Image: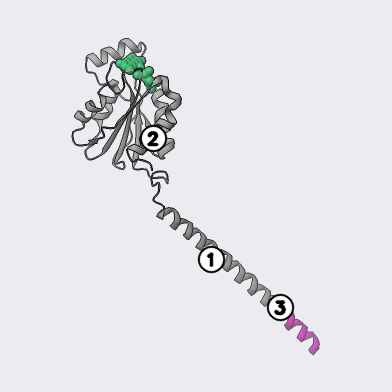
Amino acid sequence: MNKKVILWISAILIILIVGVVIFLSVQNTTSSSTVNNASSNDISSNDNTNPIKSGDTNILIAYYSNSGNTKAMAEEIQNQTGADIFKITRVSEYSNLTEEEKSEIDNNERPEVANMPENLDKYDTIFIGYPIWNSDLPPIINTFLEKYNFDGKTVIPFCTHGGSGLAGTQRTIANKLSNSTVITNAFSLSRTMMETASTEVESWLKEINVIN
Ligand SMILES: Cc1cc2nc3c(=O)[nH]c(=O)nc-3n(C[C@H](O)[C@H](O)[C@H](O)COP(=O)(O)O)c2cc1C
């Protein structure tokens, strides 16, 4: 009888000890993974070598593109900066582009945009991309620029073109947005050089200190 009691007590003790050991080892694993998470967070928050690539969303790339060149450039900028991107879309597409855009420009029209970002408050830097049309901004860009308050923001124009470069459009934008900083080192890429977009965009973004 005594032997039986001793056996029972021993069995219970063994179960208790095993239970405590398992509990302690589980505790240990959890706390060490918390420590690992904390240290990796520290590393990324202290890593200032490329703050934009680490997911900052205070930069917006807003662009209009009719045949895709400016879209490709905007996407390249997004790729290299991690910024938010916004495609400006017309309510009514052109049925005869050459005629209609010329008349819109000549008549200083403001075609309606189909979509607008809810607000621009969270962005302090805004890239504005567009194709050059008749040595000018596409009219929809005027609508976009006039719809929002860009005061105090840094505005970075970029364009694609068929030979005329920026054609003074960065000055047009600067004149419109007199309370913003419109950078003078705006970027233009010829539609015949689209295959160089990646390297050209990279060196420009470095020049203007958007990436390191
Ligand atoms: C209606 C129209 C007018 C244009 N006017 C000019 C111009 O004045 N100067 C120029 O260099 N390119 C001009 N282009 C060429 C475009 O700027 C060029 O093809 C641009 O890359 C198109 O961009 P997207 O594909 O984003 O629409 C014009 C193109 C169109 C369709």
* Nearer-the-camera pick, 11 or 185: 185
Where in the figure is residue 197, as x and y percent of width and height? 42, 28
Residue at the spot 22% in from the left edge and 27% down from the top edge: 171
The reply to whether the residue tagged 3 has its Cβ within 8 angstroms of ligand 1 is no
What's the CA distance linking mark 1 and mark 3? 26 Å
Image quadrant where one finds the N terminus? bottom right
Task: Give amino acid for label 1.
Answer: Ser
Predominant SS of the magenta segment: helix
Q: Which residue is mark 3?
A: 14
Which numbered disc, 1 or 3, marks the residue that appears first in the sequence?
Answer: 3
Q: Nearer the viewer, mark 1 or mark 3?
A: 1
What's the CA distance linking mark 3 and mark 2? 68 Å
Query: Element at badge 3?
Result: helix
Q: Quadrant of residue 115?
A: top left
Q: Is residue 120 above or below residue 132?
A: below
Q: Which residues are magenta?
A: 1-13
Q: Which residue is mark 1?
A: 31
Q: Residues within 10 Å of mark 3 (few under 14, many from 20)?
A: few
Residue at the spot 63% in from the left edge and 74% down from the top edge: 20
Task: Give amino acid for label 2.
Answer: Ser
